[in-house]
Amino acid sequence: MRHNTLFIRTGTALFFSLLLTALLSLLLPSSNGAGSPFRIFAAFVCLASALFLFLLRHWNHTLPFSEYSPPADSNRVEKLTEQIIRTEKMASIGRLSASIVHEINTPLGIILGYSQLLSEDTPDDSPAKENLKIIEKQARNCQRIVADLLKFSRRPPSRVEDMDVSEAAMDVLAVMEHDLAVNGIELKRHFTIDLPKVHINTEQIQQVIINLINNAAHAMDRGGVLHVRSSLDGKGIRLSVEDNGPGVPSDLQEKIFEPFFTTRSKGKGTGLGLSISREIIEKNGGQLTLESPFTDGHGAAFHIWLPGIPREKKNG
Ligand code: ADP
């Protein structure tokens, strides 16, 4: 059993033991009598401790029953930090590729179009015909090179495994929490433990979570509250990243998933984060959806849904 699961279960067991002890102290008959001052005092202490545990859960997100930020071991922190840096690098390559694609694709299309027009107007026996074919072929080569460049921002598909999405998200948050706090963003975790596992590459799902959190952080550039929650949803699991930023206007809600669509200033956004994220989730049989406005007429919630592995088939 993982350390955090053990911790949460111990907290839960303690909470209910305290409640039970308080109840027994008040109700069980004894030589002192059920209502003796000592019994009432013991029941009071137990109830106060249980209440303390309960409040701790709400204020601190650490105890019991579902919210807990694991003290990620140094290896995992190192791996995740590397991944966040890699995602940032990919975003830079994506930014570069996106601007190259935008700047080069239009003139390339024009070269290709005119060479085809000229070729149509040129008799087959003309020596110019061959030259025009070379221009057309080389223009197509350039288009392919530009398209290949874009593929750099899409990581090659890697090994899939049965993994716990809540744990993957908790690990990401443990590493990103400090940065979020520095930017005035309060993080609230609402994780359901022991959800069915899903079949996906851990790094890829973490890349999606990082993208969604980065987007939420950009949307809340003056600070805000970020909720990350996991829950059971039908035959799958749902992971939601919710912010209280300005939200996404209804006419842009489909557009934001298109490649290269960005509302961020030039050089800052690639418009690739959401399209790549949706592609990753859909390739794994899931869905990435948006709900906005989310609270009080503003905010955005991105929901990842992934099919869960039925428990009985998990080991077989
Ligand atoms: P980028 O972040 O590079 O612009 P994305 O594909 O990740 O590319 O996002 C596309 C657009 O979706 C963003 O430019 C922004 O307009 C919008 N968007 C994404 N997440 C949010 C959010 N949490 N709140 C408001 N708008 C968002």
Image: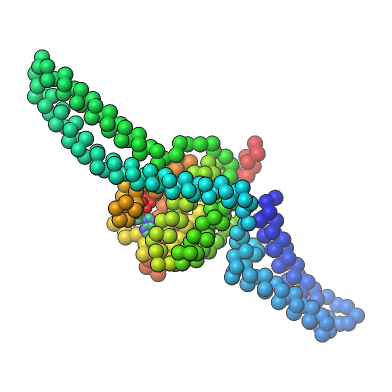
Q: Residue farthest to the right? A: 31
Residue 28: x and y in percent read 83, 75
Q: Residue at x 48, y 64 (%)?
A: 182
Q: How many marks?
A: 0
The image shows residue 107 at horizontal and vertical percentages of 20, 38
Q: Position of residue 90 (x, y in %)?
A: 42, 44
Residue 291 visible in the shown view = no
Left or right position of 162 against 271:
right
Percent across and percent down for residue 206 are 51, 48
Residue 301 placement: quadrant: bottom left
Task: Work out whether residue 211 or residue 285 is closer to the camera in this orientation and state it.
Answer: 211
Foreground pick, 173 / 66: 173
**Above or below for 23 versus 70:** below
Instruction: Tell me which corner region of the image, top left, top right, bottom left or bottom right, holds residue 152.
Output: top left
* Towards the viewer: 248 or 207: 207
On the question of residue 78 being in view, the answer is: yes
Against 53, residue 179 (above or below) is above
| Quadrant of picture, ligand 1 | bottom left
Q: How is this picture coloured? A: rainbow
Q: Is residue 120 left or right of residue 243?
A: left
Q: Is residue 199 left or right of residue 93?
A: right
The quarter in which the C terminus is drawn is top right
Q: Residue at x 8, y 24 (%)?
A: 121
Residue at x 60%, y 59% (from the top left corner): 69
Toward the bottom, the furthest residue is 37
**Looking at the image, residue 191 lies above or below residue 92:** below
Residue placed farthest to the top in the image?
Answer: 125
